Image: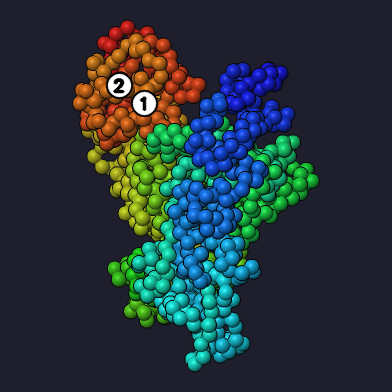
Amino acid sequence: MLDRIFEIIQKEDKKNPLTDEQIAALLNIKREDVTQFRLKNNIPDSRERRKPYLLEDLKKIIEEDPSISDRNLTKKLNLLGYNISRFVVSQLKKEILKEIKVERKVYLKNFVPEEDVESQKEEILSFKDIIGSEGSLKAQISLAKAAVLYPPHGLHTLIVGPPGAGKSQLAEAMYNFAVESGRFKEGAPFVVFNCADYADNPQLLMAQLFGYVKGAFTGADTEKRGLVEKANGGILFLDEVHRLPSEGQEILFYLLDKGKFRRLGETESTREAQIMLIAATTENPESALLLTFRRRIPVLIELPSLSERPPHERYEIIYNFFTKESVRLNKTIVIKKEALRALMLYECPGNLGQLRSDIQVACAKSFLASLGSKSSSLVVDVSDLPNHVKMGLFRLNKRDPEIERYLGEDLVVYPDKKVKIFPKEDRYMLPDEIYQFIEERFIDLKRQGLTKEEIDKILSKEMEIELKKFAASVKTSISISKKELVNVVGEKIVNAVEKAYEIARRSFKNLEDNLFYSLAIHLSATYERILGGKPIFNPQLENIIREYPLEYSTAKIMAKEINKELGIELPEEEIGFIAMYLKTFSGEKPVEGGRVGVIVLTHGHVASSMAEVANRLLGVNHAIGIDMALDEKPEKVLERTIEVVKRIDEGKGCIILVDMGSLVTFGEIITKRTGIPTRVVARVDTVMVLEAVRRAIIPETTLDEIADAIDSEKSYVGKVETLFDKKPSKAIVTVCITGEGTALKIKKYIEDLIPELKENYKIIPVGMLVQEDIVKEIEKIRKENDVAAFVGTINPGIESIPFISVEEVLKGDGVEKIKKIIGLKKENPLKEVIDEELIFLDVDAFVKSDVIDLLAEKLYEKGYVDDRFLLSVYKREAMGATILNDGIAIPHGYPEHVIKPAIAIAKLKEPIYWEKDLMADLAFMIALKEESKEYFMYLYHVLTDQNSINKLKGARNPDEVREILTS
């Protein structure tokens, strides 16, 4: 078989070599086997195998016509037999031009006037590292060049764009161009300053910029030059200039207007400085900057977000970042095409900066996995990507041929490429030490005699901690400004906390900034409780007074200031809470023990948003949101939730805030399976999530304290019905292991699923750990009721009475069992949505689009869906497989395009490929509304029953198909 790979490669079309996937298809083997064989035998991939022939033909064409456009060059190559894109041609053309040393004047005269050839020549050198300089950023680069070349010292420039869009890189390129073009002399200063670093201390910010004289303020023992003086004769780059206070903007305006300024503390003499200012901001300049300041900056350059840039540039950026990592590691990196797909498609709000750090995290994980193996290369697969990147696989909402062009095979990058490594101070870049750390720890653990599995487990945990530290350093959006905080808690609360915070800083030198935000949110809730006359309880008060005397005494002083500002009287319990915050955020000692985990679990896409808001407001990354699709099966969500609980548990359990339905039973099941304590609160809103996170980040707080505090309304937990009430003759008993509250939740869930149950049956909740003698309690219930079944998480073990687990209820089987036990029969609802005129047999289809178009067209003709339904089906298909086992496809569109529920069915004459190598011969196009879940559940039960499937595939007419589905 291996000889066959050699033979195929030797005989292939040299102008269009076969990809690994094509070779694998010819030999009926896995693509991964071909890739590994190539790498092991040092055989290049298809792109590299074609390159020598392609370069030779390229050289001939370019030598004949050096000014040929990329479009015409691509056409000529296509005529020669190459199947190649214009993007690849443009990249290779650059290499050729360097090699054959074509005169730049000849090459450039079609683009710029003769007198500007020299400066254009320098632009190519200065901006060559900016991907898109000849594409989506061409206008911006031209504007940047014009700003630098304008006599005598260039025009002041404001760069506007979202975080991570490349503002700093553009500013540095402008400086390089200014020096290379001769506008600035060699060695001219390029001074960089981020105004956000001193945003909370305007005086210090001004001192850094303009310098100060001796005695200008407390601590100014000597005079000091500012950055403006250091930038004299060069460029001053101010990042996040919107954080510059109004006073600073006014002084800067005077400098730009007159070329003069004063150091802080100077009153008579003025100083001169000749600078070109480049400023950058993520905000709207009209609202963030003074009008007078804006008027002195004539050039505005707007950079697009990553999502606004064309696919070929995103691909080149990804390629570039991976190549940089390959150089740093001196290893070949193979990026699997599904991982590449995720990187091409995921939402990346941090733009280039976030994309770079996400790629570096993936490389670090792959590097860890490669240790101990003999492979000379790294393989980056989907499993190595951060979770938010993996979501890109589900975000393809349209068929984009442009993107698919880059996803035909794995991407391979080599360490011998000459690329620029970003400077060490780049805040989005993982430090080189991360790889060294992984390697040294691996060797150390191996010396200790640990197995590969044990080493992987330990190193994964340690690396996760290191990566979290790195992630925290680049996630600038995790905290909010005090101005934003005012909108949440009110100006009065913020003012009170500011004064209390200053008191705390006098006692604790290492206070974390997060204390301010957490204390503000907490105090807002306390203020409302006091005004509402509600009591405040702190079960840890005595322990706090005894164990943390410094924190408690400081908290008492802070409380006096708060009382004065808000006109209230904080009780001693509340002072204890403030002391707990001081202990948590003082940084004096490492926190011993863990914290309670917080999970938000809802239907739709609400949970992640609520968790993000809470984390951002409190300046932490503690709450985890799990979004449940409306058509997602509860047992799948349960498995996801179990994984999250196991991952985030720090030894104190997790509180789970859910919205409705089957989710309320998750806590009991999770505790039973994992042994991790959980509490479920069966309602959720953003305020509750805030409260839960605020309490959870204090290590001393317990799971029960948090749950009891926020679950005051006790949703799904009503008055417990006593055994002396008037009871029906029949009953179902719900049982759980942690208490009667969860049994009540199971009771309510069953009542929601089977409303008819309450007419003749009473549901009695029993907590196994609450009752003193569970056997006697059940016997008592049985004497007074005819117990038909037990439902719950633990079987009481009474042989004569059936037991149904909560898992069975979640899957739907348990509900059917209960209905059968109580004699409740229901008409099959599929009769309402299956029309014989929508059943088609012996359909002659070649590809799946034939089937989709047929069924969607018939649904539209019959008035079941609107004219946008077909497009939504294709959008859903692009997100991932819609095929079950046994060759059954279930294409479906979005509920908002359904007029009335229906299911269209096609039985194919011959099986067709539906998804990759999966074939289908039965297709059910599902057109259901969001409230039509019951129809789908019935259909799912039929399609997962092998006997029913066999009958459907043997059906000879539409009547027979309908009978099988609705009987």
Q: Is residue 808 visible?
A: yes
Camera-side residue: 478 or 949? Answer: 478
Q: What colour scheme has been applied to the protein in the rendered image?
A: rainbow
Residue of label 2: 855
Q: Amino acid at mark 1?
A: Pro
Cβ–Cβ under 8 Å for marks 1 and 2: yes
x, y percent for residue 927 = 29, 28
Which residue sits furthest bottom?
268
Label drawn at residue 891: 1
**Taking the image as drawn, is residue 473 in sight?**
no
Q: Quadrant of residue 938?
A: top left
Label 1 to label 2: alpha-carbon separation = 10 Å
Residue lying furthest top in this view? 956
The x, y position of residue 520, in whole percent, is 41, 69
SS assignment at label 2: helix
Give left or right: position of 116 versus 376.
Answer: left
Please state, as top left, top right, bottom left or bottom right, where the N terminus lies in the image: top right
- Up the image or down, 181 lies above or below 868; here it is below
In the image, residue 59 above or below residue 581? above
